[in-house]
Image (cartoon, rainbow, N blue to C red):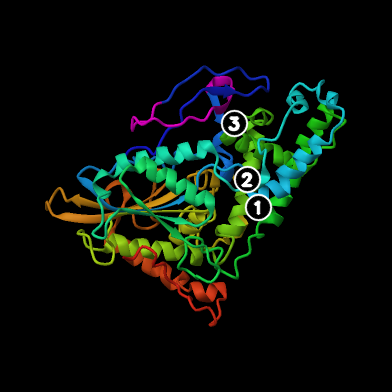
Amino acid sequence: MLSIWILLGTLVADTLALPYSSEITHQARSNLPIPHNRRQIIEGPGGYHFNVLEHLTGIGPYFDAPGVQLNPSPPSQCVVSKATYLVRHSNIYANAFDYKTFLGPFLQKLGNVTDKSIFSKSSNLTFLANYTSPVTNTTEQIEKMTPSGGQAAKAFGGVIRNLYPNLLQPTNNGSFRVWSASASRDMDTTRAFIEGLSNGAQLVEVYEGENDSADSLTPHESCPNFDSSLGSVQSGAWQKKYTAPIIDRFHLDVPGFNFTASDIVAMQELCGYDTVINNHSDFCNLFSPQEWLEFEYANDLMYFYSIGYGNPIAPQLGLPWVRSSLDILESANQISSTFNQSLYISFTHREEPPLILTALGLFNNSGYYPTVDVNTTMPSTEINYSREWKTSQILPFLGHVGIERLDCVNRTSRLQESFVRVLVNSAPIPIPGCQDGPGESCGLAAFGDYIGERIKLYGDFIGACGINGTVANRTDLLSICDA
């Protein structure tokens, strides 16, 4: 399997007394024209490289995750016969929460500075004297896809076309279908993706209804018991700690500007948003690799407790899509009356891929230590560097989870056998306790048994979400892909 893509572009070095990097051009193995993002590389002695854009969690441009270094190509003697994908939307100008909580207040505070000369004596913050917001129209741009987002989504469609040419045939109902949550950023991403797919696919809009229970691409919005504020306490505590020395350093540089923890977070977020809007950001150069790891961990804490293993109902929200995927993968090879495609791709929000991973039991810090309280693995007093839960590798823009069915020829018996493997941003991630197939894949029947056990634990979407009997569409199942 081809790598989903490698970003093109120039390497831009950090300005913190580090040497500039040489200009390097990367070409995707798919030989497709991929829109570039200018990388922000910090270089140090001994060939040390740190790519800032690969540590921005939910506000970073897409990159192939390293995973566990397994080969992403199908194993020898195997072909992909079916696959399902759940994909986050592409680059946006700004998330509404980020803009309201961090970006907006900082940009307003910066705009209210009457004497811009306070920045002139700084060695690193001089650019703030003339800095203008990358968001020029909040009404038209907040939560909306950027031009680079459309380019990236179109390129992603081309990559999928090259990866699965034999799975894109029209259905017996007409055109190939691609599903999308109804928010404009999802729909715009899907339209651009379909353009890159170049097979005349039909966009199927899935309304983000609060009363649709599990039959939704945005189950966090249809679950009354889901609390989006979870994780803010833990993340906030860590932000207060790690930003303190940064604030002291910036106050020495610009004593006339009262930097706060929220300002520091805003500046780090602007590194990502500036990049996907303008393809460059001076904010990326203000912080050391250590400080970027601290920013990354603050986001990991927030997502861990809101849409990860720290939220006890996270697996219940992710399981409907997994159950639907299992039904698709287990269906007969020929187009069936229930599932009339071999490849199913849906676009949604940042919350859903992590929820899927909790349902699958992947990226679990305590996965091999069942007696360990998973919450103790993500302290808000220090970074857990050995954690599995690293959201930069899970939910960048266009981050995705794919599940493939592999049909393989047994070298000894010459009979065909079927296996399953999970891909997270192009990287194969083995299923815990089921890794005896080619390329550490899991037998199709064994995968069905594994998901069956997960259903016993987490299959009650209605109960976990507290959905009462007055909701007409109450269900534990996702059926949007049924014919």
Decide if residue 367 is in sight here: no
- Residue for point 42% across, 39% down: 154
Verify CB contact (< 8 Å) between mark 3 and mark 1: no
Q: Nearer the viewer, mark 1 or mark 2?
A: 2
Residue nearest the viewer, comparing 368 with 352: 352
- Residue for point 66% across, 30% down: 288
Helix, strand or loop under label 1: loop
Residue nearest the viewer, comparing 326 with 479: 479
Residue beneath label 2, please?
Answer: 140
Residue 379 falls left or right of residue 195: right
Residue beneath label 1, please?
Answer: 379
- Residue for point 52% across, 37% down: 147
Residue beneath label 3, please?
Answer: 278
Residue 443 falls left or right of residue 107: left
Rendering coords of residue 109 (x, y %):
81, 39
| Amino acid type, residue under disc 1 in the picture | Pro
Q: Which residues are magenta?
A: 27-47
Q: CA distance from mark 3 to mark 1?
A: 35 Å
